Image: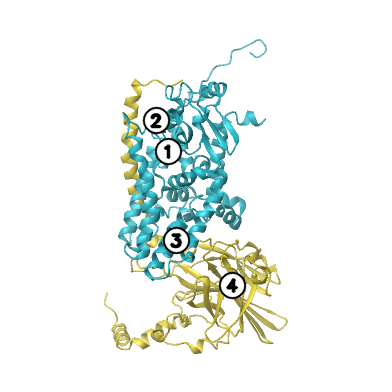
Chain colours: A yellow, B cyan
Amino acid sequence: MKAPFCGRLALLAALSFPGHWAAANHAGHDAPAHERHGAPAQAPATNAVAKEAVPAGARPRHEAKIWTRLPNIQTAGRGERNTVKLKVFGMDATELTVYAPGGPAERMRVSYPLGAEGASISSAAPGMGNYHWVIARGETPEEVRVASTAWYFSNPGDAPTRLLREIRHELEIIPQPLPREHASYRESEKWRFLVRWQGQALPRQAVHLETELGTRMSVLTDEQGVATVVFPRDQRPNPAPAKEHARPPRSKFVLAAEKEEGGRRYITAFNYQYGPDPDRQRDLAWGAGFAVLGMVAALPLLRRRQIAAAGEKPNA
Amino acid sequence: MLKSIFPTLGRLRFVVQVLMLVFTVYGAALVGHYAAEKITGALPALSCAYDMQNAAYCVLIPTQHQVHHRIGEGLVRAQEFTFAIVLPLVFTVLTFFAFFFLLGKTFCGWICPLGTLQELLGRIGRRFHIGPRRLEAGDLVENRKVRPVKWLMLLVLVFLLPLLAGLGIAPHSLGNPYCDVCPSRIATTLLTGNTEQLALRVDDGVSFALGAAANALIGFMLVGALAIRQPFCRICPMLAFNALFQRLSPMRLAKPVRHANCGQCTICAEACPMDIREVATEQGRRAYHEDCTLCGRCVEFCPQDGTLSLKWGPFKLFSSRREYYKNRVKGELPDGTVKPMKFVRREATAANP
């Protein structure tokens, strides 16, 4: 089928002005292509950070792309082992607070002042890895914004059971559970998130999902305050083969909930990343085929034994 | 009471194996997502971490990763080869050893889920009069020719290739080659209904080849285990890893003296699922062979009082006894052949017509 003339013109224009094309692509969240459930996310009104967006080509390597107006925490660079630089978007905050799953008492809760470049956080102790819970909070008389994420430091450490049970803010979104070390959120998978208000489960609360790839959708929590999110199948195929420490491509997402109480608006968000469905790169038929091949190769072992058994005497 | 439930060591081991299989494969559903992490982190290897729900740890995974990412890449970046680089690897080995000190090689014979699966298949094979085929002269290939393979697996797949990948000499997809060919990864994930690990990656030639080898291996193992006892255990790098430290654990097989019949009856060797003849022909340290999984079958099937025993330090946990042997062979032959079940019609009596 021929592309419409105006389409070809648009393509030509995009090729002629790659900067414009990049900018349009960059702002993909404004025109959601994957909108689901017919309910676009209710983006908060204030968005000081979004105005600071720079064209993709001009971004430093670790500069996070602005793809949502919801509060979120993103990496801004890696440092030494057990250190990472994080930056807050979609809200004004002065510090990052990191909660550790274990370690020395004085390191269980550490606050890091946020500068223009973000803040470098580290694990509670050199040998204390596993998930650390990271929070930024910004307050005005009208509004409270909380951004939260989890950061996995690669050493073994205490499981985040207590970390996720503790109540820290008025409105919270808590993963139920966080993926284990070798697992991850992946497209088409169902994951549960608990929404708490003053520490109590919040039923029938709208939870909005926005992804870096443009999907916008909403779900309601059930009677137990749990929102079951099916991660959208919006990952782009990765043409590059695995080489040079390439990790599976991951895309960012943010889940947010909003509640008004006593004339004050509370917005809370949890952001993390999700990966492609592994089936995109895998073929079950090939796998089953080789397994059957192995089985066939082992068949002579069964046949020959039955012949040899005739001359043998059982023991005892 | 306990004796009526576990009349033989073999019954006790079978129950432990089945319980551990269920625990390692489905344990997270019982003890909770994160509690499972704590427990699996305390053991050297459990249900494969690739199932992403139940287990989190197998000593072979961090060993490959650390050789790949720490040592290999550390050398490439011309960093100082300090203790700090080697430290994580040392910690991995020490964590493993902490567990190993307690139970020694009983992990292989009593806990390993893949070992249990193979043994269950072997029982099915015996029930249908298939096998057992042996790794000895006159049957399959001689055992001594197969034994070095586990060391090669450990050296090449767990240490050498990850190191070369870290150095940039081998492709990155060879960073954890043992996991890529490990049949436990496929078996335990399939047991949870997850076919992801059975499916082959088709976007990378090396990954495809490794996956194909793994699938062929597990296919071979599933059928082969009906005839050969513990086929994969014989080449498993975990067995080699265990063998490295087996003299350091108080848990061991003891055969302090040779009985006059040793080397004559060879029933213990026949009972050994790893076809270790040395247990019959040797004594002392040599009888406790590098391939031994401490399953205890040789002790159960030794007809001489006190010749063989399982010991932890100075404590004898289980010793061979003639009376025990006589009872044991009533239900099962040393080679694992199960005696046929007899269905006998109950005779009518006056009280019970």
- Closer mark to the observer between disc 4 and disc 1: 1
Q: Earlier in the sequence, mark 1 or mark 3?
A: 3
- CB under 8 Å between discs 1 and 3: no
Q: Is residue A182 in view?
A: no
Of residues A97 and B151, the one drawn nearer to the viewer in this rendering: B151
Query: Could you tell me residue B349's position as x and y percent?
Result: 63, 11
In the picture, the disc for residue A46 is none
Measure how far apart labels 3 and 2 are at the Cα level.
40 Å
The amino acid type, in three-letter code, at marker 1 is Gln
Q: Which residue is mark 1?
A: B230
Foreground: disc 3 or disc 4: 3
Q: Residues within 10 Å of mark 1 (few under 14, many from 20)?
A: many
Relative to B255, say whether A107 is above or below: below
Q: Tell me the residue that label 3 is attached to.
A: B66
**Marks 1 and 2, how far apart in space?**
11 Å
For the residues tagged 4 and 1, is the chain the same?
no
Measure the alpha-carbon separation of dots 4 and 1: 52 Å
Query: Residue tagged by mark 4?
Result: A207
Q: Position of residue A122 (x, y in %)?
A: 56, 73
Q: CA distance from mark 4 to mark 2?
A: 60 Å
Residue B42 in the image, given as x and y percentages of width and height: 57, 53
Query: What amino acid type is highlighted by mark number 3?
Result: Gln
Q: Which residue is mark 2?
A: B132
Q: Residue at x 58, y 62 (%)?
A: A157
